Image: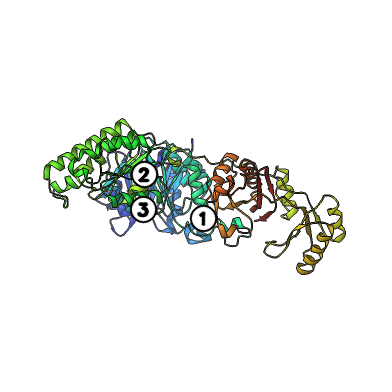
């Protein structure tokens, strides 16, 4: 059930320690907000000098109040913070909101202070938000303990930035977006982002959760909480482009960035990941509106070729599909449009809207009813006729006749949408016109920018709309790997069912010849204990017999001086595709898997996909088939298709091993050769923390 945060969001009484008449102090702003609902619960103001604050008598201490207080806001200088926490706990506080800064964000000494305070709060059975936060608010319980007001609505906003929260409120207002709750996360010394997501998921008045986070804490737990929330979670985060391991010693580590990790976690959890406050507002407006669907086949409905072409391109950029419509759907459209209209997709009225505004509604009806259409993007002039009549500027002559017709069309579109619910988004040159407001009030997202409309439709469709693949559970930790050597890593993976060619580690020529006698050629010779064997010329392939093997050994040993070598059976590379499978331990999200086209061109091609590990075989196959070069797997130019299912099964085994060994920072199999008759790991590497 998660932690009980009732005392935080619906306390029986509140005290503001550090309340002040000085507008420059945060205690003034919080106290003023707290007094907005004095009849909902007792609100006590505490100032060590006593007197009055905001016209009310102020107690000199919490003890001087003379009765228990369930929630205490602390906004005092850092030197007095610990004493204020002790006083709050002594007066029975079950929740503390710590505005005071100067803790973990200030360095190691601050971290130690913060940890000690959090321990005291937990030991007392209380909860702490912050420190270094900007307060909380709950519009559903009339709890106002932040410096600003938040419009009433159904979005819970959990943010590490106060200014971003205010921007989201301003951007959301034109779309009718409001907030059920606001929590400034602060340093998350006790109450974490995970705790808050879990509580907001249980909060009936919250229908969507918006998160701005710079520090996830336990990112995997956040993803799991979001996946099980049962309501949309929209995430805006910073620092996506920084490399998670700048000193990576494998292709996996070198190619895995924070952006990849966060995107993989969000995709698996069904979280809508956005890049800017504007995009977050767009996604929230969409998710607060009509139905969602798995499919992304989008019909573009326009009244001008230019708008239609731009909308189609923008929709595809947003990940939507804009396929040509089938014959029956085109026939249905021709029956309601005139000859010069285009019915392929985009569907262009080609001026018919000016002759008969109801053609907008007729066309929307046909598209919403078509089984081959998952969503509809309307774009262009719709709304302009009523805008002209209403004095909003623009529009052809025609006055009230066209305006009335457009208003009727808007109402009919709403009726058609109710009869055939599908995601429908409108981009209009006149988004504030009466006709557009009819659609907006019926739950149709309306935007001025084409890119916003396309992004909104993307949020209403696809994987996130239908539920995520889920966050995989970590296996129990296995006995730690102590030897990261090549053959030890092969043995570890081989024990898990990862197939390798026959191989022997050799130290000298006698051992080399003994190994060659154990299996037939052709042979492979590898110099061990080199970071990148191929780059250093430490791999020799297709050595036909023992004489060729011995010659290659002598040359390689003289050139590189490696203390050990590996003699291996040469795999049949014909009709094979080389893949890479790796796992990188992320400090926030744990093991993250990477699969893609492999071999020596891995970092050049960069055709890879990511997921939280371990990766089930079915998920692994979906990742492989989603690669840009996935067509290679099914055979091209006369080559046969390879056994993708076998490769996916090996991916599951490799990623499960890595997930069970947190001491391994990077684990990689490259290449994993997949052929028509199965998969074979040809090389492996592990890097310990």
Q: Secondary structure at mark 2?
A: helix
Say which residue label 2 marks: 457
Q: Which class describes the residues within 10 Å of circle 3: few (<14), some (14-19), or many (20+)?
A: some
Is 624 displayed left or right of 541 in the figure? left
Judged by depth in the image, the label closer to the viewer, 2 or 1, is 2
Q: Secondary structure at mark 3?
A: helix
Q: Position of residue 263 (x, y in %)?
A: 49, 50
Is 267 displayed left or right of 50 in the figure? right
Residue closest to the eye, 625 or 336 = 336
Query: Residue 258's mark?
Result: 1
When asked about the image quadrant of residue 4, the answer is top left
Q: Position of residue 22 (x, y in %)?
A: 29, 58
Q: Note whether 332 is above or below 314 in the view shown.
A: above
Is 71 displayed left or right of 390 in the figure? right
Asked whether residue 168 is in view, the answer is no
Residue closest to the eye, 238 or 686 = 686
Q: Position of residue 407 (x, y in %)?
A: 18, 39
Query: Residue 452's mark?
Result: none
The mark that comes first in sequence, 2 or 1, is: 1
Judged by depth in the image, the label closer to the viewer, 2 or 3, is 2
- The CA span between labels 2 and 3 is 17 Å
- The CA span between labels 2 and 1 is 26 Å
Report the residue at 44% width, 56% height from top: 238
Residue closest to the eye, 25 or 577 = 577
Say which residue label 3 marks: 277
């Amino acid at each position: 059930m998660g932690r009980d945060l009732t005392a935080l969001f619906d306390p029986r009484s509140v005290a503001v320690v550090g309340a002040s008449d000085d507008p420059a102090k945060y205690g003034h702003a919080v106290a003023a907000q707290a007094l907005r609902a004095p009849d909902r619960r007792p609100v006590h103001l505490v100032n060590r000098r006593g007197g009055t604050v905001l016209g009310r008598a102020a107690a000199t201490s919490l003890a001087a109040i003379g009765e228990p207080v369930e929630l205490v806001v602390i906004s005092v200088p850092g030197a007095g913070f610990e004493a204020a926490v002790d006083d709050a706990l002594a007066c029975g506080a079950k929740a503390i909101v710590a505005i005071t800064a100067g803790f973990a964000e200030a360095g190691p000494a601050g971290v130690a202070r913060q940890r000690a305070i959090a321990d005291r709060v937990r030991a007392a059975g209380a909860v702490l938000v912050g420190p270094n936060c900007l307060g909380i608010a709950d519009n559903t319980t009339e709890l106002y303990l932040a410096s600003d007001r938040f419009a009433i609505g159904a979005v819970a906003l959990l943010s590490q930035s106060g200014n971003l929260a205010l921007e989201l409120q301003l951007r959301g207002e034109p779309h009718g977006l409001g907030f059920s709750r606001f929590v400034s996360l602060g340093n998350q010394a006790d109450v974490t982002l995970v705790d808050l997501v879990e509580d907001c998921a249980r909060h009936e008045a919250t229908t969507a959760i918006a998160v701005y986070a710079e520090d996830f804490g336990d990112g995997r737990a956040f993803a799991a909480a979001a996946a099980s929330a049962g309501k949309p979670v929209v995430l805006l985060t910073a620092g996506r482009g920084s490399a998670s391991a700048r000193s990576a010693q494998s292709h996996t580590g070198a190619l895995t960035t924070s952006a990849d990790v966060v995107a993989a976690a969000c995709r698996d959890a069904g979280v809508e990941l956005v890049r800017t406050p504007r995009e977050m507002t767009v996604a929230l407006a969409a998710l607060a509106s009509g139905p969602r669907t798995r499919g992304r086949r989008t019909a573009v409905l326009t009244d001008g070729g230019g708008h239609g072409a731009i909308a189609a391109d923008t929709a595809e950029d947003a990940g939507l599909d804009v396929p040509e419509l089938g014959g029956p759907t085109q026939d249905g459209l021709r029956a309601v449009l005139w000859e010069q209209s285009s019915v392929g997709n985009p569907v262009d009225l080609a001026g018919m809207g000016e002759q008969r505004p109801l053609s907008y509604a007729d066309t929307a009806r046909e598209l919403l009813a078509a089984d081959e259409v998952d969503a509809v993007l309307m774009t262009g002039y719709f709304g302009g006729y009523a805008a002209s009549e209403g004095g909003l500027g623009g529009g052809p002559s025609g006055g009230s006749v066209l305006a009335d017709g457009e208003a009727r069309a808007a109402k009919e579109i709403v009726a058609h949408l109710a009869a055939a619910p599908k995601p429908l988004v409108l981009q209009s040159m006149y988004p504030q016109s009466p006709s557009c407001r009819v659609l907006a009030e019926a739950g149709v997202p309306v935007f001025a920018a084409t890119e916003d409309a396309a992004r909104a439709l993307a949020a209403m469709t696809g994987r996130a709309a239908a539920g995520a693949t889920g966050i995989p559970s970590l296996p129990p930790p296995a006995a730690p790997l102590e030897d990261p050597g090549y053959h030890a890593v092969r043995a570890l993976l081989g024990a898990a069912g990862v197939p390798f060619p026959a191989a022997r580690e050799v130290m000298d020529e006698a051992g080399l010849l003994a190994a060659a006698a154990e299996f037939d050629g052709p042979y492979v010779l590898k110099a061990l204990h080199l970071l990148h064997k191929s780059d250093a010329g430490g791999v020799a392939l297709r050595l036909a017999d023992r004489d060729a093997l011995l010659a290659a050994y002598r040359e390689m040993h003289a050139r590189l001086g490696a203390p050990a070598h590996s003699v291996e059976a040469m795999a049949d590379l014909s009709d094979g595709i080389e893949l890479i499978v790796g796992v990188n331990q992320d400090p926030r999200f744990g093991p993250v898997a990477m699969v893609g086209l492999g071999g020596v061109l891995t970092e050049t091609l960069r055709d890879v996909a990511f997921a939280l590990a371990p990766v089930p075989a079915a998920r692994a196959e979906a990742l492989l088939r989603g690669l840009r070069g996935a067509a290679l797997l099914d055979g091209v130019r006369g080559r046969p298709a390879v056994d993708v299912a076998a490769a996916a099964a090996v991916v599951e085994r490799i990623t499960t091993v890595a997930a069970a060994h947190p001491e391994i920072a990077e684990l990689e199999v490259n290449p994993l050769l997949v052929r028509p008759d199965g998969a074979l790991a040809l090389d492996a590497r592990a890097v310990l923390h």
